[in-house]
Image (cartoon, rainbow, N blue to C red):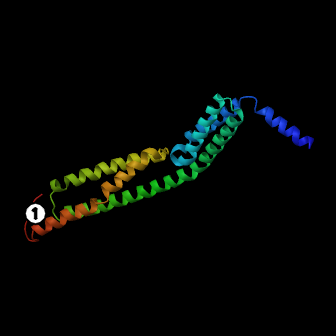
Amino acid sequence: MRRLVLIAALAAGACTQPPVKEIAAAEQQVERARAVGGERYAPERWKQAQAALALARQRLEGRDYRGALSAANDAAENARGAIEATGPAQSAARNAAEIAIGEVRTMLERATTERALAVKAGVPRSALAPLDARGERAAQQLAGAVTQLGVDNLAYVEPILAELRTEVTPLPDLYRDARTQWEAKRPKGRARRR
């Protein structure tokens, strides 16, 4: 019984001092979570950590030290949760980016094959020029995305790859269509212009 009274007295006494150290520690955890990408990859935990930290500060100003301590502990715990969730989420995003890079490369290779068939069929290079420019732009953007992925700049890579997918997916079919239209207009026996 005495032990319980002593613990209760210590707990009550501990809450008479402002929990400045605990709030500072929570701020460090929240900043660490932000630095590793918690805001992007674990947004729910990140928001909870931010809200709890704001509540801790508010309660500190209102001299509710027990409430401030509780909120600071909640902020630190949510920040730790955001940090833990960030690693797997980043790994999944990196894997998705690598898959997208493979898909874009495959489409560019298919486009190159279809372009070669169009040139062989006699389609004038001037007719292919807009498609060529589109393919060259896409290849340059892809090279930039690969470089940025190499330095883990997923925030840059993800939207670029989404745009590239849209840009290059129809490219093989467009080259094929140019060849098909050219062949339909030109019987096999006629001379081809370049």
- Nearer to us in this view, 82 or 130: 82
> How many marks on residues?
1
The residue at the point 34 percent across, 52 percent down is 164
Give the vertical position of 60 relative to 176 (above or below). Answer: above
Going 55% across and 40% down the picture, which residue do you hit?
A: 34
Q: Quadrant of residue 67?
A: top right
Q: Quadrant of the C terminus?
A: bottom left
Residue 175 in view in this figure = yes
Badge 1 marks a residue whose secondary structure is loop
Position of 134 compared to 42: left or right?
left
Of 48 and 104, the residue lying toward us: 48
Regarding residue 37, the answer to whether it shows in the image is no
Q: Residue furthest left?
A: 190
Residue 6, position as x, y percentages in the image:
88, 38
Judged left or right of residue 186, residue 51 is right
Quadrant of res 32 = top right
- Looking at the image, residue 194 lies above or below residue 149: below
Q: Quadrant of the N terminus?
A: top right
Report x, y in % for residue 149. 46, 47
Q: Position of residue 176 (x, y in %)?
A: 23, 65
185 or 73, nearer to the observer: 73
Residue receiving disc 1: 192
| Residue 64 position (above or below residue 86) | above
Q: Is residue 157 left or right of residue 79?
A: left
* Callout 1 crowding tier (Cα within 10 Å): few <14, some 14–19, many ≥20: few
Going by the image, does 62 lie left or right of 166? Answer: right
> Looking at the picture, which amino acid does disc 1 mark?
Arg
Q: List x then y, in percent, for residue 25.
A: 67, 35
- Rendered residue at 35%/56% (across/down): 165
